Amino acid sequence: MPPSADFIPPSFTWSLWQSLKGTYTPKVTVPDAGLRGKWVLITGSNNGIGREAAIRFARSGANLVLACRQPPSHETHPEQVVEECRAAGGGHAEDQIVEWWECDMADLSSVQTLAQRWNDTGRPLDILANNAGIPSTNRHTATSKDGFELCHQVNFLSHTLLTLSVLPSIAKAPSPRIVCTTSCLHYLGVYNLSNANTGVDAYANNKLYFQIWLTELQVRLLQHPDYAHIVVHGVHPGYVNSGIWARAQGLSLAAFMSDPIFWISKILVAWVGIDPHQGALAIYNAATSHECGMQSDGADEFRGGAKYFNLTSENEPSPYTRDAASRKDVWEFIVGELGLGKKFHITPELERMVLD
C-alpha cells in the first residue's frame, strides 16, 4: 500500500536538516528516578550506550536483565557488566537482581526463547529497551540464519518480535515504557519496503521503519484497554563513540570507496561524537521522566506516546510516522515477515491487536 493519497513526502532538504540536528548534542543531565523493585530488560547492554544505560538503571535501584549475545573480542563480556551494575546499585544490592540472559538478535529462535523465558517468570516488565544494533555495509549483503539481511533483522525485525512477545508481561506493569533506539538517520531512510531486506542503505531505512512501526504500535495499544497504559518512544542517542564502529581498522582510499556511507559516519562520529554515558541518557530519559509518560485523553492522538527524542529533546519525527497508510503498510510487512500467528505463537488476545 502506498502512502495516503494526500500525503506529501518530506523534501530531501528538510530531511537532511533534521538529520543534521542529530549532530548537535549538548551535554545534558537527567534526574535520577526511583526504580527500586522495577524490572528492566535491555538488549545490546554489554557495550556502548546499552552498557551505560544498564549501569544508570542499576544505580536507580532497578532489577535488570541484560539481553546480549556471546560477544566478539572487542566488546565487553556481559558478566563484567553484571558486576558493574551490581556495584552501581550500591545500597540496593541486598535485594537487587542483575542477570545476563543470552540472546542473539540475529537468530529469531533465540529472541523467542528470551521472550518465553521472561514470560515464564510471571513478572511485570516495567521497561523494555530495544537497543541492540549493528552498522550496515553496502559492500555485501550479510544474511542471518533466518534468511534476512543482517542489519534489518538485528536492528528492527527481532525487536518487533521481542516487543510483541513480551507485551502481556509489559501490560502487567502499572506505568510501563518501551524505548526503541532509532536514529536521526531515520530522516534519510527511503520509504520503499522492497529495500527493507536488501542491505542497500539498510541502517537508515530500517531506522525509519522502526520509528514508523513503533508509532503504529502505540496507536494499536491505545485501542485496547489492557494495553492502553503502555507508552512507546524512539530515541536518537547522538553520534556516539562506541563499539558499533569497532569493525573498521585503518582508513584507505580502497576501504573508503568500498563502503563510503560507513566511513563517512565513522569520520562524523570522530568529529562530533559523544561518549556512551551521555548517549545512554536518551534511553534513561525516555524510560523514566515524567514528561515522557502517558498524558491525559485529548493531549494528542498518541496521548503522549510515539515521540522521537534527539537525546533528551523532543523533535518532530519523519512525516511518514504520522501517515496512517504508511504505518499500516510497515506493520503488515513485519507481520508477514515474522509469520505472526503462524510461525511464531502469540496469544489470541494479541492476535486481535496485531492482525486486525
Image: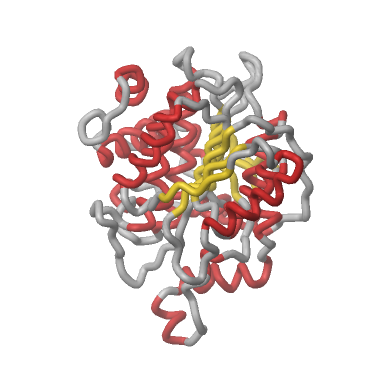
Residue, x 40% and y 49% (percent of image)? Answer: 103
Q: How is the image coloured?
A: secondary structure
Q: In this orientation, which residue lies closer to the viewer: 203 or 300? A: 203
Q: In this orientation, which residue lies closer to the viewer: 292 or 23? A: 292
Count the marks: how many?
0
Q: Is residue 6 visible?
A: no
Q: Is residue 200 visible?
A: yes
303 to 93, vertically: above or below: above
Q: Residue furthest left?
A: 342
Residue, x 64% and y 38% (percent of image)? Answer: 96
Residue, x 48% and y 12% (percent of image)? Answer: 225
Q: Position of residue 122 (x, y in %)?
A: 45, 25
Please identify the quadrant where the C terminus is shown.
top left
Please identify the quadrant where the N terminus is shown.
top left
Q: Position of residue 355 (x, y in %)?
A: 30, 24
Q: Position of residue 4 (x, y in %)?
A: 39, 31
Q: Position of residue 30 (x, y in %)?
A: 76, 43
Residue, x 26% and y 34% (percent of image)? Answer: 344
329 to 154, vertically: above or below: above
Say whether residue 286 is left or right of residue 31.
Answer: left
